[in-house]
Image: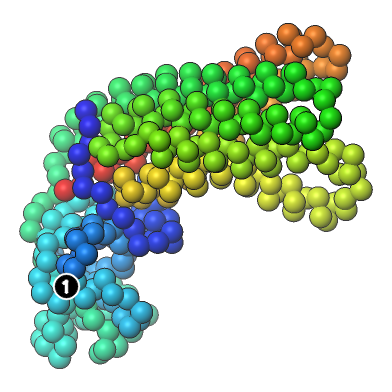
Amino acid sequence: MTISTTRYQAPGFGASVMLSALHSPLAHGLRRNRCELRYQARLSGRHIALPVSYARMDDSVVVRVGRAETKTWWRNFHTPRPLSVWLDGRWYCGTGHVAQPDSLEREEAAAIYQAAFPRAEVPTPDPVIVIELASAPEPMVGVQTHHIQQRGLWQRWFTNVTLGELLGFAAPAVTGALVRDATPVAAAVALLIAGVAEGSVLGWFQAGVLRSVLSGMRSSGWIRATSLGALIAWAVGVVPVLAADGLDTWSPWVLAPAAAAGVMILLLSIGITQWYVLRRQVTGAGRWIWATALAWLAGLLAFTGFTSPLWQPGQPTALVLVIGIVGGLLMAAVMAAVTGVFLVHILRTQRTAP
């Protein structure tokens, strides 16, 4: 079943990260004073998702706009406009408007906000948005139905992505076995090409599942993003191949930070490049960056834990290849399982949005 939801975009990377945190199951404390607003811009017609601090009293929500001269979004509400608000893990519909300066409504709204944030000042020039909630949250029975549908999604994602990564990883696995005795430069170039092939195959299998649940998802963009991320990751991975003899001369004070930076780039590369595509489809897509980093970390640990004791110098190429492919299958399954859990969580948020 395709999710035919309006595509909302955060105004920047920082906002996307904050939205991801708000929808995280671990963000209960953060959600006490922050929420997500969704609205359609008055002039451009764009659909915007925005994290804001809020105070609530009964069916009203108050949002103070600090440093208003540096922001423009609040000007959309000089006249009342419909919007949606993510509060306490539920979506509400409502209407928002800027309270008139020096009005009784503005004073009451500022008092509500001040009570919720005793240490925060509400200067008179700061605009205050008043949101009147017009509908109750979606009943839990709907969420349970989504859970039933999403079990099938996780299974399809796990099966397809495991197969895609296994087939894709066969390219660098075979290449690595064949270039063991090649020069470092030749081996590095061959592995980079194989890494791009791996990313293309993985991206193609992932896109096949995403197209079935996200209207407007284009396979070509997702495949290009995944290939680029894989190329970046493999570029970091081949550094030890090119500098194997020179690494011994590096100071530990240089080698340790460089290795840590390399690991971070390796783990985040695919997630960041895929996020650039996914952010056009779903809100809170920044969660995907950390999901893929965690998934690849778990997958690489599984691969290393399996292959390291089995790979020995002087083994036949065929045996090296078999060990690598089995390790690749284990890595692919772990990565697919973890990313599948996060994908279901992200799409559940989109399904319950109005």
Residue 141 picture location, percent across and down: 15, 34
**Which residue is found at the position 16% from the left and 88% from the top?**
101
Q: Quadrant of residue 175?
A: top right
Task: Please identify the residue farthest to the right as the structure is shown.
Answer: 249
In the rendered image, which residue does mark 1 sit on? 77
Which one is in front, 191 or 39?
Answer: 191
Residue 206 picture location, percent across and down: 42, 29
Relative to 192, residue 37 above or below: below
Could you tell me which secondary element the residue under label 1 belongs to? helix
Which one is in front, 59 or 3?
Answer: 3
Task: Please identify the residue farthest to the left as the structure is shown.
Answer: 134
Taking the image as drawn, is residue 45 in sight? yes
Q: Residue type at mark 1? A: Phe
Q: Is residue 235 left or right of residue 221?
A: right
Taking the image as drawn, is residue 158 in sight? no
**Which residue is found at the position 11% from the left and 81% from the top?**
105
Mark 1, Cα crowd under 10 Å, few <14 / some 14-19 / many 20+, is many
Residue 84 picture location, percent across and down: 18, 57
Relative to 152, residue 34 above or below: below
Q: Split into 4 quadrants, where in the image is the N terminus?
A: top left
**Which residue is found at the position 22% from the left and 32% from the top?**
2
Relative to 257, residue 5 above or below: above
**Which residue is found at the position 31% from the left and 66% from the top?**
52
Residue 151 picture location, percent across and down: 31, 25
Q: Is residue 314 left or right of residue 147?
A: right
Colouring chosen for the image of the structure: rainbow
Q: How many labels, in total?
A: 1
Relative to 133, residue 120 above or below: below
Q: Is residue 315 left or right of residue 73?
A: right
Q: Is residue 101 left or right of residue 176?
A: left
